[in-house]
Amino acid sequence: MFKPNALIPELSVSDINRSLNFYLNILFFKLEYQRKTDKFALISLNDSQIMIEEINGFWESGILEYPFGRGINFQISVENIDELYENIKNHEYKIKIEMQENWYKANDILIGQKEFLIMDPDGYLLRFAENLGERECEIDLIS
């Protein structure tokens, strides 16, 4: 049974069919449900959930122009980042930041991620990340 997360971003999209094709066929999201007459869908990938709805004049706080996702990126945790990355490449979809390994300081530890960044068809930034675990942080004299 589908259980919605406590926080689910809803993205206004210019073409619901183009977005559904992108998210479902290129990014391996699952269609949880949709309301075709409203041009709305709720999709998921592992524990991540996103709502997408074709622009309807109701939810906008200002003029929407490409890229819609200015100022935000959505990190989406995945278990097999290499498979997803290869599928995106096979569809010849543009990668904004190529696959890389990054370690981020969190208090006294480093949290590792293998990650890459793409933009969806409307310009929302999507950062896919696979957990690499944690390691001790070297002494940082400059904090």
Image (spheres, grey):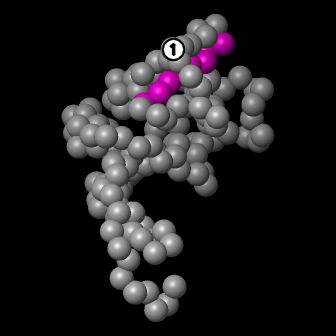
Residue 141 position, x and y percent, is 46, 92
Q: Is residue 106 above or below residue 71?
A: below
Left or right: where 66 falls relative to 79: right
Left or right: where 13 falls relative to 108: right
Q: How many marks?
A: 1
Q: Amino acid at mark 1?
A: Met
Q: Which residue is mark 1?
A: 1
Left or right: where 62 falls relative to 106: right
User: Does residue 118 appear anywhere in the picture?
Assistant: no
Q: Is residue 102 above or below residue 55?
A: below
Which of 131/86 is in front?
131
Q: Tell me which residue sits at (61%, 15%) in the image.
A: 39
SS at badge 1: loop
Q: Give the magenta part as a residue range.
A: 38-45
Is residue 42 rendered magenta in the image? Answer: yes
Which residue is situated farthest in the bottom direction here?
141
Which residue is situated farthest in the top direction here?
37
Q: Tell me which residue sits at (59%, 9%) in the image.
A: 36
Residue 67 position, x and y percent, is 56, 45
- Secondary structure mostly seen in magenta is strand
Task: Give neighbour class at mark 1: few <14, some 14-19, many 20+ (Cα, 10 Å).
Answer: few
Residue 73 position, x and y percent, is 53, 50
Q: Is residue 38 above or below residue 130?
A: above
Q: Tell me which residue sits at (41%, 44%) in the image.
A: 77
Q: Tell me which residue sits at (23%, 37%) in the image.
A: 83
Is residue 74 rendered magenta in the image? Answer: no
Left or right: where 4 falls relative to 107: right
User: Does residue 9 appear anywhere in the picture?
Assistant: yes
Residue 29 position, x and y percent, is 41, 27
